[in-house]
Structure formats: structure tokens, C-alpha cells
Image (spheres, rainbow, N blue to C red):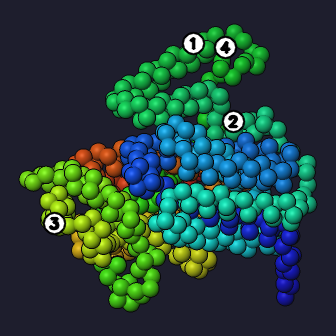
Amino acid sequence: MNEIKRNPFHRAFYVANTMEIFERLAWYGFFTLSSLYITSPTAQGGLGFTDKERGFLQGMIPFLLYLLPVITGALADRFGYRRMFLIAFAIMCPSYYLLGQVHQFWTFFIVFFAVAVGAACFKPVVVGTIGRSTDDTNRGLGFGVFYTMVNVGGFIGPFVAGYVRAISWDLVFVMSAFWIALNFIPALFFYKEPTHDASKDQRSLKLVLLEAQEVLGNGRLALIVIPAIIALMVTTRMGIAFSYYLLGVAAWLVLNWGWSVLIKKSSASHTQTVSWYLQAVKVGNVPFVLYLLILTGFWVVYFQLFTTLPVFIRDFVDTKDVVHAMQTYTPSFVEFLAGVNLEQLSGALPALAQKYHAGMDATALKKLSFELVNYKVMVPDDALATGLLALQQGAAMPQTLAEQWAAQYRQVNPEYIVNIGFGLIVVCQIVISAYIQRWRALPILVFGTLVLSSGIALCGWGAGIALGGSTVIIGVVVFSLGEMIASPKSQEYVAAIAPKSKTAMYMGYYFVSMALGNLFAGLLSGWAYTAIAKEMNRPVWMWYLFTLIGITTAIALLVFDRWLQRHRKQEPASGNT
């Protein structure tokens, strides 16, 4: 029996994986905490932005981050991977630091966008290095190792950031800049371009645009879609009524339809090639585009783990049950996982007491509670009212009350609960992937989406109950199992849709669904958290909305798969999908 001999990995493979760990330490160290930082009051070191502003930032910037690699990947192929690594780190290192130094909305937006540009320069280069430094004998193992390194960085980063943010928010950004600065060492002294066939990847930007036209659609389609997306961002940021947005989009579609009718009549007398704006609207690979649109729903649900869950845990979930369990079994971890900055808390209490008055209704008292939870204590309404009244009357000192509340009502850092998912992936992903590889991609993708959606619903049930922390932890575990089941299969299914000779090219455009998912996840998170969770005081309903999106996505995937199978049966034997 012949055995396949695996080739050893190129040195660039190990260097790239090392840089990936540090880059993920920086990104997840910040992004997992970004919801908390953006909405925390300025007195506590945060930005004090609204949830709608948070949703705009967390939707817009990652959306651009996942789109830009289409261009930056082409630039890296032409000008060299090592050079692109250095450019990426030169952009990200100061940008991460500056994120903690700017406090106005648009300046923060610009610096955050700079981080995204640097990350977009890095992403295609590190993946390309893994691809170039492996071959058919070890590529599967190589990407398995790489995916594990991604989650190692994602697991460690929030732990370090969560610890230093108890000291100062500024240290979170200093640490992210530090992780990126470390990457200059392997990039400058250890990284060498892996050997490859240069004729296969010297792509010009023109070729990239032609590929996009083949896969996604032509310029006329882009002219319809891109302004609609930009208008959605503007509508969300400016607080314009959504009905006006829908009317504007409808008018834009009618205008484009009229233009299509006009150019169709005039093109009958012209046989030469016409400019892109005179062409009819054309979708590229229709099944692939439909798949990306449906899969966007999966990512909308998935990214709620980072955009919504941390602030939801902070504002609505009482995690004292988890704190009590730690005090019983692992008391040495309490200060690390549920640390309270007593100086900040005691400094905030006098101003909070001035806002309190006897007879304050439940809604007004809840607003004070939302301010207090930023200091990682969740005090029951009756104890909150009694304590603030005692401060007003001089019957209690801020330092004494802060110590008392920290001892009784301290909360687990939300980022540590969210981070459980990364730990599970590091430990379980390879085993789960090996077990489910025997089944067809689509049914497993649907099953994983339903499991993930169930996890989201469980997270919502943690609001306002005695075992809130434990319930959310179970929800995160279920959610992570769904992610491990569905996420790899969502990429595998691309092979069933793309032309067999162009699977790699289509895989590059798979990330369009993640870009759109980020955009809609952020915008939806900002709106739902403000309108449903806070104004209506129905946080569980918000999670039911996300769950419904997940279930709808799973049903749409089943319908799509049946349609695709019928579509292929009707095609000529020689046709391509």
C-alpha cells in the first residue's frame, strides 16, 4: 500500500502563523470589548456614544474591512507579501494606539477605519502565505493549524484586554499596538517570500474588477446596490426615518428601471461594445450571489456575539451566580474575572446620588442602574435607592458604599463570558469537523445555523433571572457548537456552487457575505438595542428577533438547495453553474 509523504512546511508558514496570533490578539483584544468601550460613560474612560452610534461604527468599519482585501490582495500579489506585511503593521500599530486617544465620533471613525485598512492589507497576505507554503499533501493540515492559531489569538486577546481595562481603558489600546509592534520582528528578520508560480497571481486591479463582474455582477448592478448601501448608512447615522429610506430606494430602483428600458431601445441600433453604464443590469453567477445573500443572515446572527452580547450582559444579566461559584471553588480568580475598580466606583457615586430623588419611578431608577453597571456592579433597585439616599443624607461614605456593593454585587467581565466560545473552538473544532465531514455540506450548515440560533435565544433568557450568568454561559456554549458545525460547512458549500475550475477565485468573494453580515449586524444591533431592549424594556424580544433571522436563514438555505438541484437538472450537460 502506497503512503502519501507529506512535505514539511515552509519556514514562512510558521512565521505567518506567529504573526496571525499577534494580529488576532490585537484585534479581538479591542473588538470584543469595543461595545463596552464605545458606550461606557466618559467618566469611566469610555466614549459615551449611543447604541445607535455604536451600531453604525461596528457595522460600517468591519464591512469595509472584509471588502478591501479584494483590492489589497491584488496589490500584495503584484508588489510582494513581505512589503505588504510591513505596510499593514505600519498602519495598524499607531492606529490602535490612537483609538484610545480620540474621543469625538468622526475622529474615532477615521482612526477605526485606518485599523480596518491595515487589517485588510494583512488578511489576504497571511492567508496567501499559508496557501503558497503548503501543497496538496499538507494544505488541509496547514489551514487547520492556521484556523487554530486564529482562535488562540482570539481566546487570549480578550483575557489580557479585560484585565488591563480594569486599570485603564487606555491600556487596552496600548496592548493592541504592542501586539502589532511585535510583528515587525518576524516580518523584518524571519519572513521570506515562499516560492510560487508568479505567472498565476500577478493580477492587476482591472483583472480584479473583471473577476468581480464575472462572479457578482456588472457595473450597472453595482450602481444600484452600492448607493442603496451608502444611503442605509447615512439614514442610520443621521437618524432619518426608515420609511424615507425605503421610499428613496424604491425611487432609485424605478429610475434605474427606466434607464434600462431607455438604453434597451437605443442599443437595438448599435452593435459595437457599449460603455458599462449603457449595459443592461447583469448578475454574475446567480446561484452564488443568492447563496451569499442568504448566508448574510447567518453572519448577522453570528456577529451579535461581539456587537450586542457584551453590552447586554453588562446592562441586563446579573452574573452573581457565577461570581458566587468562583468564590466557592476558585476564589483566587474572582479579582481577575470579576474585578471592580473601587476608586472609579466610589468617585462616580456622589454624582449618581445627586441624580436620585425620593419617589423616583422604576424607569428613572433603571437609567441610574444603566450608569452604575459600567463599573461592574449590578445593584438591585431597592438597595440602589437606599444606598443613594444614604449618600445624599451623609449617612454613608462613597468609599464604604463602593466596597459594600463590590463585595455583594460584583459582576463577571462580559468579555470573559463571550470568550468561552474561542476556548471551545480551540479545543473542539478539529474533532467536530472530523466527525461531520461524512455528511453533505448543506444539511449540516442548516443544522448548525439552527443550533447557533438556539444559543442566541438562550442568551436572551439570561436577562433578569437568578441564574442569569449560568444561562448566558450555556447559551454561548450552544452558540459556539453551532458556529463550529456551520462555519466550515458554509465555506465548503462554495465548492458545490462555483464552477469547478474557479473554486479558489469564488472563495475569495465568499467574504462578501461576511462584509454584508457585519454591516447589517451592526446597524440592527444599534437599532434593536435602543428601541427594543432599552426603550421598550424588552431585551428578550431583541434576542427573539435575532433568533428569527437565524431560523429564516436556515429555511432559505433549504429552499435554495432544492432550487439549485432542480436548476442543475434543467441545464445542458455541458453548461456551467
Q: Which residue is mark 1?
A: 262
| Amino acid type at image mark 1 | Leu
Provide the secondary structure element on which disc 4 rests: helix
Camera-near label (2 vs 1) is 2
User: In the rendering, which numbered label is found on residue 213?
Assistant: 2
Q: Residue at x 48, y 24 (%)?
A: 253
The relative height of residue 526 versus residue 148 in the rendered view (above or below) is: above
Residue farthest toward the left in the current orientation of the protein: 359
Counting residues from the start of the chain, the first of labels 2 and 3 encountered is: 2
| Amino acid type at image mark 2 | Gln
User: In the rendering, which numbered label is found on residue 267?
Assistant: 4
Quarter holding the N terminus? bottom right
Q: Position of residue 19 (x, y in %)?
A: 73, 64
Q: How far, Cα to Cα, is label 1 from label 3?
A: 79 Å
Q: How far, Cα to Cα, is label 4 from label 3?
A: 85 Å
Q: Position of residue 536 (x, y in %)?
A: 22, 48
The relative height of residue 319 versus residue 367 in the rendered view (above or below) is: below
Q: Residue at x 66, y 14 (%)?
A: 267
Q: Are marks 4 and 3 in contact (CB under 8 Å)?
A: no
